[in-house]
Amino acid sequence: MQTIAFYNLKGGVGKTATAVNLAWHAARWKHRTLLWDLDPQGAASYYLGVDGSTSYKAATLINGKQGIGRLKQETRWPGLHAIPSDVSLRNLDSKITEAGKARSQLRKLIEPLGESYSLVMLDCPPTLSPVAETIFAAADYLLVPVIPTHLSIRALEQVKTWLKEKKYDHLKVVPFYNMVDRRRLLHVEMLVKRPAVMRGGLKTWIPYSTHVEQMGDHRAPVGEFASHTPAARAYRHLWFELAEKLKL
Ligand SMILES: Nc1ncnc2c1ncn2[C@@H]1O[C@H](COP(=O)(O)OP(=O)(O)OP(=O)(O)O)[C@@H](O)[C@H]1O
Ligand SMILES: [Mg+2]
């Protein structure tokens, strides 16, 4: 089992949209896939149609009193399961701190899922809090959507420095560009001459596209309702490139 966290310190950069589209592709390629919506906003749960179908207490999870197996839901796509978001995730930070088990707790919860899944994807909230630390300890790969601007690049550099300082050496950081608009000179420049921090990431980039925005109307990945568009093609390529990198 491999665990991939979709993470960025910055909000609104495409973590959730990418997680949902890649999880859908993974399941289509017969990888048993679980997407855990760790963001109390619940956007991934909404896209996958599993919102409001369960509720759990963050505290009981963190104390190990409840396994997560019970919380998984089937989606309408075969092979793709999800653990919906829950409002109690808002308290996860304080619960983790109270329990004094900052790093290892999420990994312990996820480990038993290896019996049922080959891929676990975590849709993360935009934060560098104790929750983020448990996510970093649990994940093998950190997939980071980056909008090609100087500030986004700086945010990525900050996260990488922080990970190094905190010695999350096992974690492979894999950035890729999202919301690329080739009418913008800066975007083109950053594609052509990639900043050092983007090297080692995925080469495929996702264009700025209204079809991604329409996921909310369709409550589905782009490939389901606009399969011949540049955005759908880009997600497909991103999936192939990731699968190759992870040797899936
Ligand atoms: N490639 C894209 N083109 C156009 N719009 C996009 C693209 N990717 C994401 N979006 C839109 O941008 C908004 C933010 O995307 P998304 O929710 O995936 O970001 P996020 O990083 O998960 O945000 P948050 O930090 O709030 O969890 C959404 O309205 C989404 O539809
Ligand atoms: Mg999100």
Image: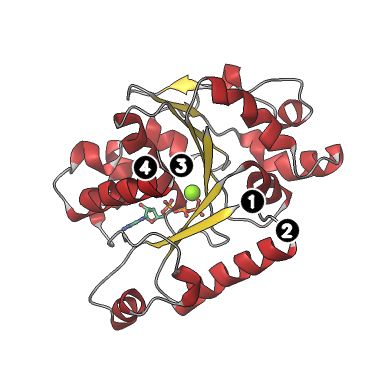
Q: Is residue 48 left or right of residue 103?
A: left
Name the mark on residue 43.
3
- Dot 4 surroundings within 10 Å: few (below 14), some, or many (20 or more)? many
Q: Which residue is mark 4?
A: 22
Q: Amino acid at mark 1?
A: His
Q: Is residue 142 left or right of residue 79?
A: right
Q: Residue at x 19, y 55 (%)?
A: 230
The residues bearing labels 4 and 1 have C-alpha atoms spaced at a distance of: 22 Å
Q: Nearer the viewer, residue 163 or 229?
A: 163
Mark earlier in primary sequence (3, 2) = 3
The residues bearing labels 4 and 3 have C-alpha atoms spaced at a distance of: 15 Å
- Residue 75 occupies quadrant: top left
Q: Residue at x 25, y 58 (%)?
A: 209
Under circle 4, the secondary element is: helix
Q: Amino acid at mark 2?
A: Lys
- Tell me whether the residue at label 1 lies in contact with that at label 2, contact meaning CB atoms closer than 8 angstroms: no
Name the mark on residue 170.
1
Q: Which residue is mark 2?
A: 167
